[in-house]
Image (cartoon, rainbow, N blue to C red):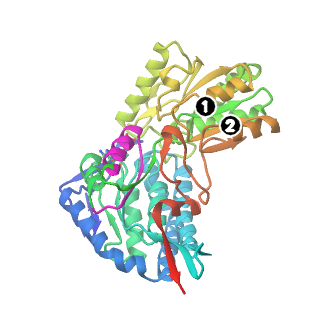
Amino acid sequence: MTLKKNFIAGEWIDGQGGIANINPSDTSDLIAEYAQAGPAQLEDAVQAARQAFPAWSTGSIQARSEILDRIGQAILDRRAELGALLAREEGKTLPEAIGEVARAGQIFKYFAGEVLQLRGELQPSVRPGLDVSVTREPLGVIGLITPWNFPIAIPAWKIAPALAYGNCVVFKPAELVPGSAHALAEIIVEAGVPAGVFNLVMGPGRVVGDALVNHPQVDAISFTGSQNTGRNIAAAATARMAKIQLEMGGKNPLVVLDDADLNTAVECAVNGAFFSTGQRCTASSRLIVTAGMHDRFVEAVSERMKQLVVDHALKDGTHIGPVVDERQLNQDLDYIRIGSEEGAHLLCGGERIERETPGFFLTPALFTETHSEMRINREEIFGPVASVIRADDYDHALALANDTVFGLSAGIVTQSLKHATHFKRFSQAGMVMVNVPTAGVDYHVPFGGRKGSSYGAREQGSYAREFYTTVKTAYTLA
Ligand code: ADP
């Protein structure tokens, strides 16, 4: 079994041992072993990034743009192969995985263009004879910490803007999915990024991640992951005045009103709640349905759920792949038990099932007769589990939708312009969807939430510059 290495200061480096990357669709399938970095290697990576920063940040933006374009093109050219690797290590279906890879490629292409779009402002001073310019500069060394559920898209939407705006990067991917991160690193290296500008350090969050967050020479941290880890990172990083950006999941509502088109409502619910095995921070885990639609909706969703094939992620015809690992499967099963104990009715699914290959297969679960106070409606489960909450009318549905500590994405299915418009205005989420699933967003517009879901500047699109640059105001007496 080959050992895949870390990339530090322009070299592929062994770690302190390696970990196995196991296929959740077939636990007998070992993908490869991945070197685990320790504190010394993290230190080397930060130092390499620091040394590379002056030249990279002041070098040719044409060269930077071309490198990002080459990375994007290579990802797009290799989307089938990278998609297969991603599906194999994370468990989303092959079409979902190829879609994610394509998105990563498009993100690099987008930021190849964005490099050339950075502009400042020149304005007169209030003092005669003075000019004032406002420009943006890179931050320095940025630590990027990513989760397992989007093993290539999330790294792409952090690495691409970081490099585009002239920063150097130390990237720590999630332990469960080093394969896509490593393949992406190979592509970045082949595209000609100078030594030290990009560094890959694989390893445990509590060792490598923690050292990155606390390193005095890391200027900023962009993190996507759980709320608990996000909170700890915020405390540590802000204590030393580092800039932070945190994306931490959701408990996203999909409101279905009496006047909704039933097919649209069912497709939005099933896609949003169960596709990608429900392992998306934008998944619709709360289906809030008004009284006149409730029974028809529940019946149609449960009928549709019977058609969903749960199986090996790489098998033709699979709609829902496995849960990512045993720990997450046990968490999902725990919440299913908790929901039943709280008095919710488990209408269908929620069972661990066997397939030809040994894997973590769970049938999608739908709870009905649930209330907003139940833990299954308050805590992020991060699996193929959704609850139906009955609402009296639109106003009640809106109040229920906002009754959460999270605020990432929120959807409504309705044919009423009045209610759709009101919902867009009064939903307390960072992203609002009308007649489309809560998950599935474009790559060129801001992504992010409010309340407990997000902290700091938005990610993606031109809004990414808020995080990855700092503003300078300069005065000139002519
Ligand atoms: P999950 O429970 O979904 O794995 P986490 O928030 O634990 O979510 O993980 C998201 C990312 O944060 C992973 O790359 C993980 O290694 C990293 N991480 C975990 N703990 C820490 C920590 N204490 N400091 C920095 N990074 C961490």
Q: Quadrant of residue 429?
A: top right
Residue that mark 2 sits on: 426
Badge 1 marks a residue whose secondary structure is helix
Q: Mark 1–mark 2 contact, CB under 8 Å?
A: yes
Q: Quadrant of ligand 1?
A: top left
Q: Is residue 112 visible?
A: yes
Give the image location of residue 299, x and y in percent.
Answer: 69, 22
Q: Amino acid at mark 2?
A: Phe
Badge 2 marks a residue whose secondary structure is helix
Give the residue drawn at x 52%, y 46%: 93
Q: Quadrant of residue 337?
A: top left
In this view, the residue in front, 131 or 115, is 131
The answer to whether 57 is drawn above or below residue 98 in the figure is below
Give the residue drawn at x 39%, y 43%: 230
Where, quadrant-wise, is the N terminus in this rendering?
bottom left
Q: Is residue 415 visible?
A: no
The answer to whether 392 is drawn above or below residue 425 in the figure is above
Give the image location of residue 92, x and y in percent.
Answer: 49, 45
Q: Is residue 206 left or right of residue 437?
A: left
- Other residues around mark 2 within 10 Å, as few (<14) / some (14–19) / many (≥20): few
Residue range highlighted in magenta? 217-238
Q: State which tag comes first along the sequence, 1 or 2.
A: 1
Number of numbered callouts drawn: 2
Q: Amino acid at mark 1?
A: Asn
Residue 402, disc: 1
